[in-house]
Image (cartoon, grey):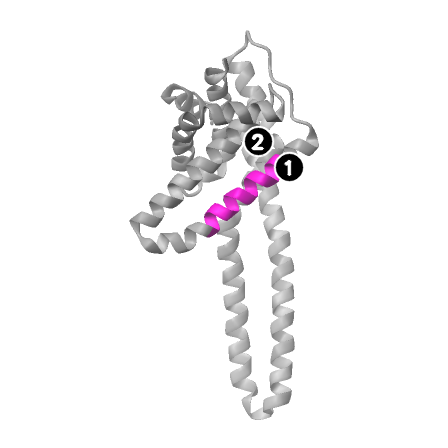
Amino acid sequence: MLGAAAQALSQMGSRPFRAVLLKSIGLALILLIIIGMGLQHFLVSLLGAGEGLAKQSLGPSLHLPLMIVSYLLSLATTLGLIAGSVLLMPVVTALMASLFVDDIALAVERSCYPDEPVGRALPVMRAAIEGVRTALLAAVVYLAALPLLLLAGFGAVIFFLCTAYILGREYFELAAMRYRPVAEARTLRRLHAGTLFVAGLFIAAFVSIPVVNLATPLFAMAFMVHMHKRLSP
């Protein structure tokens, strides 16, 4: 397992990996900017409408205080959207990277297993479903972590273990589905659940590093391609 993790890490700087990472981050940024601009426009319009109603109801004497409150709320909204975008960046990048996981798997197979047949790319619909599923699970983990982290060390441990289980399971299935039907891939995952949970701890450690976690889908997919090769009967 340590060897598989080391192999995955050693490939992170290769040209195919860099290309996928740049595409994933670029698409994620574009998506977040579009969503952020739309939300900001909506919320600022809502604040403007509320300010107008308040002015009509309270009279001209409170115009200045209302303008100050409106400005502060608008500033808080903008800062909140920026902070939310930063927190969601790994999740959105994971969603975008799911479009390219077969590219990563193929690069690993060709470079590390040149004498073995390569896997089949997942059908577009299946890849999209699995990508959305993984991204939603990651989002649930991140959101659940917010109250858990208030429990200090205990909450952080729970978050770490949940992340290990979810991401280890999902990325192993993505790797296995290149060689097996969906049902068979999931059966193989359940058969080696303990081993894959431990493997997921490596991914959880990777995803806990700010900025570096943008490359989590690349590391996780490469790692699980190696793990699938080792666990296949």
Q: Position of residue 67 (x, y in %)?
A: 55, 80
In this orientation, does residue 23 appear?
no
Q: Inspect the image, locate mark 2, and give the three-letter code of the amino acid beneath it.
A: Val
Residue identified by numbered label 2: 20
In the image, the segment drawn in magenta is 130-143
Residue found at the very far left of the displayed protein: 153
Examine the rendered structure and indicate whether residue 211 appears above or below residue 80: above
Q: Position of residue 14 (x, y in %)?
A: 50, 24
Residue drawn 48% across the image and 37% down it:
166
* Mark toward the start of the polypeptide (2 vs 1): 2
Q: Is residue 106 above or below residue 162?
A: above
| Number of the front mark, 2 or 1 | 1
Of residues 204 and 192, the one nearer the viewer is: 192
Residue drawn at point x = 64 percent, y = 83 percent:
53
Query: Disc number at residue 129?
Result: 1
What's the residue at 61%, 26% (across, down)? Answer: 182
Which quadrant holds the N terminus? top left
CA gap, disc 2 and disc 1 = 19 Å
